[in-house]
């Protein structure tokens, strides 16, 4: 009984000791002194109970500071701590967790005394303005599991970085190592111990300047689940030993200019979900990669990115065998042929982007089965043939559709009700007309609409102007659409709204536009009446105004002089008259072109440019 009472008393006393250890509280105060704190995040760092300070965590048994989390996740500089990393922090000997990422240590080097944090297991110094070389002492912290020093301005050391790479590679608990975007150019080709990076599951070497071949030791870390080599200048092929990394889920090999080939052993990565080869020139035919995609990778892959990889040849039927694909990115290649039937089997597909290729066949009806598709971009190809409702039948989740710049004919029944609510629709240069596409009438979530040059020669339905309230881009140009423009255009709230209604048969007056419109073309219509002063506004960001080839009368309002962003103004071929406002020489520093020709202005002699 007495022993029990003593025990309870003993454990009750412990929390009293959370007024911190003097050395540690001194270290924290010095750290604060060395840092500017514009957003006053360290305001709570007063008094003696340092364990209750923001970002500080103590062991509730010993009272020692074990955790310091001062990370900043915003690019807003005035939220960042900035200054020097105080050397008094060596007294925080019991730290297990240190995260100072996203602040600005203004070119301090990573302190070599970092190894006085002997109990550290989590270290995040990313994006924190550190310079200099990586101290090899970092490898003395034997319990490190997580090291992120990405996004700093390191340089190679005299030893070719071998010292700290060696040291880190020996740390058997190390699971996570992020060295992305560190300005490094030398990676050691060999590491001397036997069990290099024994527990590593995450290795990010991306966005450095490594220009050697990829060291063999990388492909011996069989515990790796995430490997990113992207954005370097590694020489030579990806070795076949990549096939031994059986735990890999993520493999980033993008933007490596000198990659000459990928081995068929890549197909043996039965857990790989994410493969990014974008902008690494493979210079082969896609169909020749069949060996890879007939391996078990085809059961696991969810994200495949070959955009800009210099692939040619046909889009193969076996694409449909990669049955768990959610995202297929093939844009900017030289792939020709059709979109194959097998695509309809990719029932999980959310993103299909094959724009800017040489596709010259047709689009399969099986596309209409892709009930999970969110984004479809087949623009800038030479696809032909007729698309009907069937092609869109079950695309209930679609919100991005770009079929522009092909030779497609879109023939859809006027009573069809689309199963989707699009935000982005671009059908420019497809043949849609002569009728106005009535199926648009329920698409009231659009922010981008391009129906330019689509052979529509019809009357604009009244409901159309109720669909524009979220549009930041509207292009109906080069059709024969007949209709009266509303007095005011109601548009989206973007910061660079563009409206192209030129080359149609619109009539009525020049509509008012909100001040967030940057480009407005109404030329080659039948607009009449005066140009209202209200087109411009102190806040207007109009850069381009084209009203040419209409039937406008009256004068140019002097308020146009207030359009400070104006690049280009064209009011040619109207019936405008009177004096031109004499302000164009100073109205805009950007001014590039003015066209007042074919009107009845007086005082043309004052303008060099008309
Ligand atoms: C002590 O810390 C542990 C884990 O950090 C926590 O689960 C526990 O609730 C804490 N105990 C007290 C008394 O605060
Ligand atoms: C940045 O943060 C400061 C301080 O919190 C705030 O006043 C300012 O509005 C922010 N600036 C931006 C661009 O978000
Ligand atoms: C710490 O690391 C340095 C450099 O790698 C090494 O020279 C030194 O012996 C190490 N110290 C301890 C105590 O391990
Ligand atoms: C690699 O980069 C280093 C340092 O920038 C340079 O000296 C070397 O010539 C480069 N080697 C190759 C093969 O490009
Ligand atoms: C598509 O392009 C390829 C390669 O240029 C060509 O061989 C083929 O005949 C074209 N097919 C069609 C239908 O135009
Ligand atoms: C769309 O889904 C329905 C119900 O699942 C199915 O009966 C129909 O065949 C599908 N249409 C297409 C074109 O896949
Ligand atoms: C409309 O668009 C917004 C985003 O702009 C989206 O969050 C919302 O789900 C969309 N609504 C419908 C009905 O699709
Ligand atoms: C004017 O628009 C019509 C279509 O409405 C088009 O046929 C004609 O080429 C356009 N003229 C110019 C000069 O753009
Ligand atoms: C210019 O004015 C004259 C006389 O007022 C008129 O005859 C002519 O049609 C006008 N020209 C244009 C292009 O409006
Ligand atoms: C603009 O033109 C007016 C009238 O011709 C003249 O007084 C003024 O100095 C010019 N301003 C500039 C910046 O050239």
Image (cartoon, helix red, strand yellow):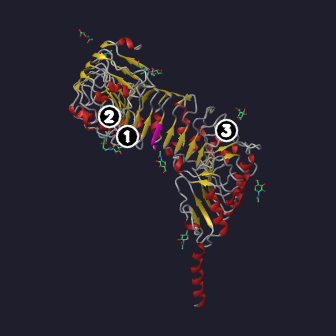
State the separation of the CA atoms marked 1 and 3.
41 Å
Up the image or down, 326 lies above or below 35; here it is: above
**Residue 373 horizontal/vertical position (percent):** 39, 41
In the displayed structure, does residue 72 sit left or right of residue 420? right
81 or 72: which is nearer to us? 81
Disc 1 vs disc 3: Cβ atoms closer than 8 Å?
no
Looking at the picture, tell me which residue is in the foreground, 561 or 121. 561
Q: Quadrant of residue 98?
A: bottom right
Please tell me whether residue 327 is drawn above or below residue 561 in the rendered image. below
Q: What mark, if any, has residue 514 been given in the picture?
A: 2
Quadrant containing ligand 6 reads top left
Q: CA distance from mark 2 to mark 3?
A: 50 Å
Mark 1 or mark 2, which has the lower sequence index?
1
| Residue 457: mark in rendering | none
Q: Which residue is mark 1?
A: 370
User: Gap in Å between the C-alphas at discs 1 and 2?
Assistant: 39 Å
* Residue drawn 56% across the image and 38% down it: 292
Q: Nearer the viewer, residue 66 or 565?
A: 565
Q: Residue at x 51, y 48 (%)?
A: 74
Secondary structure mostly seen in magenta is loop
Q: Residue furthest bottom?
A: 1
Residue 327 covered by magenta stretch: yes
The residue carrying mark 3 is 210
- Front of the two marks 2 and 3: 2
> Residue at (62%, 33%) from the top-left corner?
259
- Image quarter of the C terminus: top left
Magenta stretch? 324-328
363 within the magenta span? no
* Mark 2 or mark 3, earlier in chain: 3
């Amino acid at each position: 009984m007495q022993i029990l009472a003593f025990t309870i008393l003993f454990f009750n006393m412990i929390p009293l000791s959370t007024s911190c250890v003097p050395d540690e509280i001194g270290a924290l105060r010095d750290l604060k002194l060395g840092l500017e704190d514009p957003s006053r995040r360290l305001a709570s760092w007063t008094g003696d109970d340092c364990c209750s300070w923001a970002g500080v965590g103590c062991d509730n048994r010993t009272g020692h500071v074990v955790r310091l989390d001062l990370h900043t996740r915003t690019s807003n500089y005035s939220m960042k701590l900035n200054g020097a990393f105080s050397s008094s922090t060596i007294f925080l000997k019991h730290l297990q967790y240190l995260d100072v990422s996203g602040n600005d240590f203004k070119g301090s080097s990573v302190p070599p005394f970092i190894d006085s944090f002997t109990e550290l297991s989590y270290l995040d110094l990313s994006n924190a303005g550190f310079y200099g070389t990586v101290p090899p002492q970092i490898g003395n912290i034997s319990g490190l599991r997580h090291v992120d020093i990405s996004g700093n301005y390191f340089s190679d050391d005299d030893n070719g970085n071998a010292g700290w790479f060696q040291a880190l590679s020996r740390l058997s608990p190390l699971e996570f190592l992020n060295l992305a975007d560190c300005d490094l150019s030398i990676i050691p080709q060999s590491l001397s111990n036997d069990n290099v990076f024994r527990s590593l599951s995450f290795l990010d070497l991306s966005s450095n300047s490594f220009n050697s071949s990829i060291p063999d030791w990388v492909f011996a870390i069989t515990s790796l689940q995430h490997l990113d080599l992207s954005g370097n200048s590694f020489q030579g092929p990806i070795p076949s030993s990549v096939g031994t990394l059986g735990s890999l889920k993520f493999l980033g090999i993008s933007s490596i200019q000198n990659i000459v080939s990928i081995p068929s052993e890549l197909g043996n990565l039965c857990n790989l979900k994410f493969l990014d080869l974008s902008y690494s020139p493979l210079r082969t035919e896609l169909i020749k990669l069949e060996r890879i995609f007939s391996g078990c990778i085809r059961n696991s892959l969810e994200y495949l990115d070959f955009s800009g990889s210099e692939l040619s040849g046909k889009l193969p039927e076996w694409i449909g065998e990669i049955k768990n694909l959610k995202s297929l990115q093939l844009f900017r290649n030289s792939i020709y042929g059709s979109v194959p039937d097998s695509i309809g089997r990719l029932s999980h597909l959310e993103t299909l982007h094959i724009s800017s290729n040489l596709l010259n066949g047709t689009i399969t009806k099986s596309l209409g089965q892709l009930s999970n598709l969110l984004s479809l971009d087949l623009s800038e190809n030479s696809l032909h043939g007729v698309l009907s409702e069937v092609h869109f039948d079950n695309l209930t989740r679609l919100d991005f559709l770009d079929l522009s710049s092909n030779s497609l004919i879109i023939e859809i029944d006027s009573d069809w009700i689309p199963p989707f609510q699009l935000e982005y629709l671009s059908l420019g240069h497809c043949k849609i007309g002569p009728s106005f596409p009535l199926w648009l009438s329920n698409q009231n979530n659009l922010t981008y609409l391009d129906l330019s040059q689509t052979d529509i020669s019809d009357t604009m339905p009244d409901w159309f102007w109720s669909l524009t309230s979220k549009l930041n881009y509207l292009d109906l140009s080069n059709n024969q659409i007949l209709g009266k423009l509303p007095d005011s255009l109601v548009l989206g709230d973007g910061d660079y709204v563009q409206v192209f209604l030129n080359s149609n048969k619109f009539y009525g007056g020049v509509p008012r536009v909100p001040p967030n419109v940057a480009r407005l073309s109404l030329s080659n219509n039948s607009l009449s009446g005066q140009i209202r002063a209200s087109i411009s506004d102190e806040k207007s960001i109009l850069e381009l105004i084209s009203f040419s080839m209409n039937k406008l009368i009256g004068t140019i309002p002097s308020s146009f002089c207030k359009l400070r962003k104006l690049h280009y103004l064209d009011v040619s071929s109207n019936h405008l008259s009177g004096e031109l406002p004499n302000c164009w020489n100073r109205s805009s520093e950007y001014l590039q072109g003015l066209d007042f020709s074919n009107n009845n202005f007086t005082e043309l002699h004052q303008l060099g440019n008309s």
